[in-house]
Image: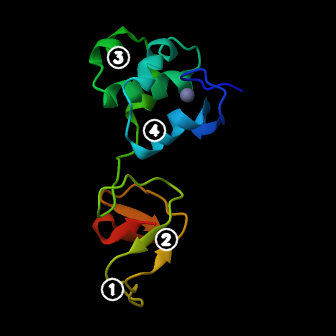
């Protein structure tokens, strides 16, 4: 298996291109940069090639990365079907914890202050939640069916 973006075969694994149930193959370098949000422009020179991929999921991910890198020149050269463009633009809002770490589905977080819960017990400061979901509510994440403001959590 090789990386759909850069062609590397180092620790390649699948990566879901939200919100569809479609996947691309990513090497560890591409994946870690995409998950952390710290994109290395030099590494992502590979988008010059992946933008011509025949796989919709690869095109959509490439389009999103070009946008983050501010490469409107390359985005203009891409041809996306209307459906692919809608998919590319349906990216979930990025969310960050209290100290600015990018949050992802599946992260573990800690609550950094006591939080009263409507009709329930207070969530104590220091409580850890595993496998959070980003959910659809702006500024909040979902931990065990409870919405928590991102300013009150820290990734652990
Ligand atoms: Zn790669």
**Residue 22: horizontal and vertical position, in percent?**
60, 34
**Residue 148: horizontal and vertical position, in percent?**
37, 70
Q: Which residue matches tag 2? A: 145
Q: Give ligand 1's quarter of the image.
A: top right
Q: Nearer the viewer, mark 3 or mark 2?
A: 3
Is residue 85 in sight in this rendering?
A: no
**Residue 90: horizontal and vertical position, in percent?**
40, 37
User: Is disc 2 surrounded by few (<14), some (14 to 19) or many (20+) residues within 10 Å?
Assistant: few
Q: CA distance from mark 3 to mark 4?
A: 18 Å
Discs 4, 1 touching: Cβ within 8 Å = no
Vertical placement of residue 97 versus 48, above or below: below
Q: CA distance from mark 1 to mark 2?
A: 15 Å
Discs 3, 4 touching: Cβ within 8 Å = no
Q: Residue at x 38, y 31 (%)?
A: 40
User: Is disc 4 surrounded by few (<14), some (14 to 19) or many (20+) residues within 10 Å?
Assistant: some
Q: Secondary structure at mark 3?
A: helix
Q: CA distance from mark 4 to mark 2?
A: 26 Å
Q: Which residue matches tag 3? A: 75
Q: Which residue matches tag 1? A: 116
In depth, the one of 47 and 91 nearer the eye is 47
Q: Earlier in the sequence, mark 3 or mark 4?
A: 4
């Amino acid at each position: 298996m090789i990386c759909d973006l850069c062609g590397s075969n180092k620790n390649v694994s699948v990566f879901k291109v939200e919100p569809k149930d479609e996947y691309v193959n990513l090497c560890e370098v591409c994946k870690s940069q995409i998950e952390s949000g710290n994109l290395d422009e030099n590494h992502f020179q590979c988008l010059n090639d992946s933008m011509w991929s025949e796989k919709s999921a690869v095109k959509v991910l490439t389009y999103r990365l070009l946008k983050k890198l501010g490469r409107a020149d390359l985005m203009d050269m891409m041809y996306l079907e209307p459906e692919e463009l809608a998919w590319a633009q349906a990216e979930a809002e990025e969310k960050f914890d209290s100290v600015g770490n990018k949050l992802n589905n599946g992260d573990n977080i800690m609550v950094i202050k006591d939080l009263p819960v409507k009709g329930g017990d207070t969530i104590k400061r220091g409580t850890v939640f595993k496998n959070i979901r980003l959910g659809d509510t702006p500024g909040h994440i979902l931990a065990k069916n409870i919405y928590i403001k991102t300013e009150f959590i820290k990734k652990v």
